Amino acid sequence: MKLKTLGLAAATALILSLPAMAEELVIGTNGKPGNPRVTGAEMFGALLEQASGGKFTVKVAHSATLGDDRQMLKSVRLGTMHMTVNSDGPVAEIVPDLNAFGLPYLFTSLPQAWAVLDGEIGDSIAAKLDEKGYVVLSWWDNGLRKITHTSKPITHPDDIKGMKIRTPQSQVTIDAFTALGANPAPLAFSELPAALQSGVFEGQENPLANIYSSKLHELTPYIAKSNHKYEMAPILASKRWWSKLSDEDKAMIQDAMDAATWYNRGVFLIADSELEQKLIEEGAKLNEVDVDAFKAATAGVYEKWEGEIGDIVPRIQEAANAAAGN
């Protein structure tokens, strides 16, 4: 009996001396390695692991390995995935107000967009997503978008009449390019390189950071600096998972996410100035566009969306103007 007692005590001491098993959190994204969605998620993971003393680790499931944006949203809602760095188009299918952020030429700078996202309008959209089973941990960046083409520069809307252009899964983006006279079609980002190589599309639109990290300039070397719209990347957590966490763990995760947010936003902020020269050195041809002509051609998109989602459109215009100091 004495030996058994000593054995149990020794085993208990050994168990207590072992480090606790870390809880692995999974965050899914369609970005490829090097994309700011991926590097931002990796930064979040490193910060959280350090802050938690190893209690949490983060697995970044990149390149849509756990499904496209819509599939990841479903997994997060069901609680089978902890978090996703998603796209505003698919999330706007859940809360249509989010479409307002993608209206053409709404924002002229990234800090202007951040001010609106981090304010009352962003909070109101987050509250609506909470009702649908999602916790908004942050609004990451997906940049000001440029138009690329396989064989010619684009300077005026006339240059894209009839153009077969890939867009993200975003109806407001499709509407803008339809207004410009193009033939837009949505496609998952992970499938874009193959579609360009096969000739399904003549071009696409993305921020320089995404273009460079996915080497899209090797397929579509003509890059028009159109800055025609802004996109964010919402970071959504499963409400089912989040509600089970302690307040201490929630605060620790949120702090790490807040720090990673400024890393992600900073990457996009400096990308346009730093990547232009790199792209030119690698054979890309960048050009300015007739912004006034693009604005005039897409003005009707505002009217259409105000009819669909109501006063969020003038409200976001007012907030954007205020953030710009107008």
Image (spheres, helix red, strand yellow):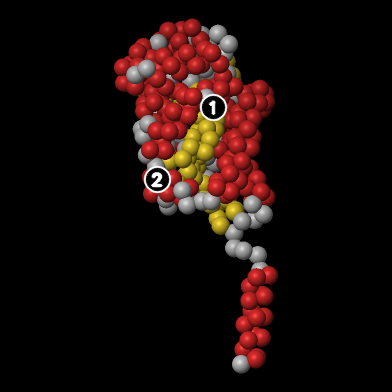
Question: Which numbered disc flags the more N-terminal residue, 1 or 2?
Answer: 2
Farthest residue to the bottom: give it: 1
Pointer 1: what residue? 118
At x 65% / y 91%, what residue is drawn? 3
The correct choice, above or below, for 171 with respect to 104 in the image is: below
The correct choice, above or below, for 35 with respect to 66 in the image is: above
The N terminus: image quadrant: bottom right
Which mark is in front, 1 or 2? 1
- Disc 2 marks which amino acid? Arg
Q: Nearer the viewer, residue 173 or 263?
A: 263
The C terminus: image quadrant: top right
- Disc 1 marks which amino acid? Asp
The correct choice, above or below, for 274 with respect to 258 in the image is: above
Q: How many marks?
A: 2
Residue 184 percent across, percent down from the top left = 37, 24
At x 52% / y 12%, what residue is drawn? 321
- Give the Cα separation between the discs numbered 1 and 2: 23 Å
Kindly identify which numbered label has been placed on residue 77: 2
Residue 295 seen by the camera:
yes
Residue 317 percent across, percent down from the top left = 46, 14
Residue 152 percent across, percent down from the top left = 50, 18
Q: Nearer the viewer, residue 127 or 224?
A: 127
Residue 192 seen by the camera:
no
Kindly identify which numbered label has been placed on residue 210: none
* 167 on left or right of 51: left
